Amino acid sequence: MQSYFKIFLVLIAISVYSTTIAQSNHAIQILEQGRKTSIRGMSVVSNQIIWVSGSGGSVGKSLDGGKSFQWMTVRGYEKRDFRDIEAYNQKTAIIMAIAEPALILKTVDGGENWYKVFEDSTKGMFLDAMNAEAKTIQVIGDPINGKAFFAMSNDLGETWETNKLDGIALNDGEAFFASSGTNLQISQSSHTFKKGTFMVTGGKVSRLLNARDQRDQYPLPLLQGKESTGANSIAVSPSGKQAFIVGGDFAKDTMRTGNAIGVNLEPSIQFIQPKTPPFGYRSSVIYLTNKILVACGTSGVDISKDGGMHWENISSQSFHVVQKAKNGKAIFLAGGGGKIAKLNLNP
């Protein structure tokens, strides 16, 4: 009788464990995986149109919400790593290659052909992220001669202006991470001084910077001091009044210390420590609403429903980047091994 009771308890435990695993992974629907490319660039135009970019000169596109992907290797750039992508529709997209020579390419025919719109072979050049708002595209890169690299286009990437000689001075060991293309964001805060392009740095020093205003610089209360530490991603809320920053230490990706911080953007910059932080190093964060956020990294995916103050882990699967449709509500993630997934949040 006792042995039967033990078996019964074991069966219950197995059932509960299986249900918990099913629930925790229920939201993640794998769409693609197994391709020899690490995806860090993602641009979701709508619920149906998704573009991704990665290593090995790879670019992928879906026109049916991720049910199928068309993959292409950009001719002549088969060994380049395209760490970020900005897409406007199913025909027009812009991709960014990171290291020397730094390159930006554009297609207007859905990826059939790509042409060069920017190139810089300066020693030490390393582009990290792009951000697009309407016809304006902004790019940041690691320091050249001690100053952050910044470039901007106002005509959908056809021509570029750079200010590498007048950029913001960075500290020794301070740079940007090219982990998800999301450490550069536009703030539409109604407070004039806080309206602009914000970027976050990492490494031995981690700061919040305004790309165009050298007065607007704030040390971040995040883990820092090593090449693997600091901020990786910043998201600005739909209201423009708050932001959220994630990072940590990618060399110790389950560490929860100093990996996230909330930011009030108006009337003045104020940092707010989460009460329950994300569950490890996080390379990308997005707002779904002013209260709901999603973050991902190599050790999992988390969600917050109260503006980033408390986080819940919903998957231990590894991803580099998460993005929401610019015109829609669909949410997608991408990472190593060509993995692309859709996030279906439970009501």
Image (cartoon, grey):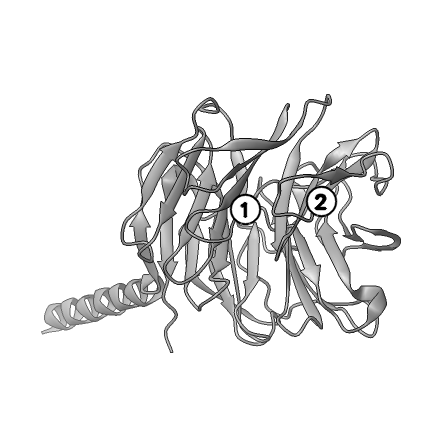
Label 2: how many Cα within 10 Å (few below 14, some 14–19, many 20+): many
Spatial CA distance of label 2 from label 1 is 33 Å
Please provide percent x and percent y for residue 106: 53, 38
Which residue is nearer to you in this view: 31 or 13? 31
- Quarter holding residue 190: bottom right
Which residue is nearer to you in this view: 14 or 126? 126
Q: Is residue 269 above or below residue 229?
A: below
- The number of numbered badges drawn on the structure is 2
Q: Secondary structure at mark 1?
A: loop
Q: Residue at x 78, y 44 (%)?
A: 205
- Quadrant where the C terminus lies? bottom left
Q: Residue at x 48, y 48 (%)?
A: 42
Of callouts 2 and 1, the N-terminal one: 2
Q: Is residue 80 above or below residue 23?
A: above
Return the residue at label 1.
Answer: 253
The amino acid on which the numbered mark 2 sits, given as a three-letter code, is Met
Q: Residue at x 63, y 69 (%)?
A: 237
Q: Check contact, mark 2 vs mark 1: CB within 8 A.
A: no
Label 1: how many Cα within 10 Å (few below 14, some 14–19, many 20+): some
The amino acid on which the numbered mark 1 sits, given as a three-letter code, is Asp
Q: Secondary structure at mark 2?
A: strand
Q: Is residue 199 above or below residue 116?
A: below
Please provide percent x and percent y for residue 33: 32, 43
| Residue 318 seen in this snapshot | no
Which residue is nearer to you in this view: 266 or 191? 191
Determine which of the numbered discs, if any, sits on residue 152 in the image.
Answer: 2
Determine which of the numbered discs, if any, sits on residue 296 in the image.
Answer: none
| Residue 34 seen in this snapshot | yes
